[in-house]
Amino acid sequence: MPSRKPVELLYEPDPSKACEEIKKSLLYRRSLVVVGSFSIRRDGQPYLANGERILFVKSDWSLMVQRDSFSTEAVVSWEACDSVKPLCGEKLSIVAEKEEINESEKEPGSGILERLHSLEFDFDHVYAVISTNLVDGTMLLEPGDGELLTAVLLKPELIETGFKPLPSNDELKSGFVDLIGIDSKGLKTVVLLTKKQANGRNVVELSRYIASVRRHVSDGEEVRGILVAPSITNAALAKLREYNFDYRRIDLQEVSEILSYYRSEIGEKIG
């Protein structure tokens, strides 16, 4: 098996090679740095003219653009995106998309309006592509989405004390929810899990799941909603409170430690 390379560096790559390296980096959720001369479009409209800048893409797909390595001011800063992908052609482009809550254009009665926003970085020239695959010896491997659910089933108090997962969520006839359980007060509780920073789209998903569950419970029966994530945006937290949902922070390192312990105890892979 080939040894791990902590850093991959392409200096003055042509657009094709740069595109392939960026694809690989995004696929494996590695942190990425692209140095070059590029312009920026937001939602298809010109945002910044061409200039020499540094584009940072973190492993959670949050973005930051700086003018140079000595500048402390970010030209663009975006929290975790729903998708980031390169477009390969004669010149390189990188497109990031995410759904956001638009406060000024709410649909009557809905409370939340999802709107897809995009940033497109059009490169005139790529000076360097740096992809990092670093291992911090103080941390365990980040769990996958399925393993996050497995850890919660093994240790339900990760959600809250007294929480008891139900054996299945078959009663949810439309869509799929991560977990349904009963809280310490006996209330049916819908849980949405994400290992990324929670955003407005997650609030929308949770509200839909709860609406679906409410169609299959007795009239007047209360259904709680809990969004579980390592962190959450301020906008999403405000919307959770507006809907009277709850947020629970989950420590991914603790999740990894739980999985590691049970794997060593049981002697086989979980999940």
Image: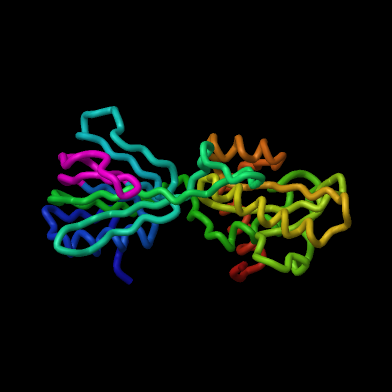
22 relative to 45, above or below? below
Residue 267, placed above or below residue 242? below
Along the line of sight, the residue nearer the viewer: 173 or 257: 173
Note whether 75 is above or below 181 in the view shown: above
Q: Is residue 38 magenta?
A: yes
Q: Is residue 203 left or right of residue 42?
A: right
Give the colour scheme shown: rainbow
Give coordinates of residue 52: x percent, y percent.
15, 40
Q: Is residue 262 left or right of residue 44?
A: right
Q: Residue placed at 17% from the left, 46% from the top? A: 36
Residue 137: percent from left, percent from top: 43, 48
Residue 39 percent across, percent down from the top left: 20, 44
Residue 202 part of the magenta segment: no
Residue name at image x 48 percent, y 55 percent: 141
Q: Would you say 28 lies left or right of 208 here?
A: left
Tell me the quadrant of the picture where the C terminus can be found: bottom right
Residue 177 position by quadrant:
bottom right
Q: Nearer the viewer, residue 63 or 109?
A: 109
For the point 26% across and 36% down, which residue is it? Answer: 66
Q: Main secondary structure of the magenta part?
A: strand
Report which quarter residue 232 is drawn in: top right
Instruction: Give the residues drawn in magenta, as a range.
Output: 35-56
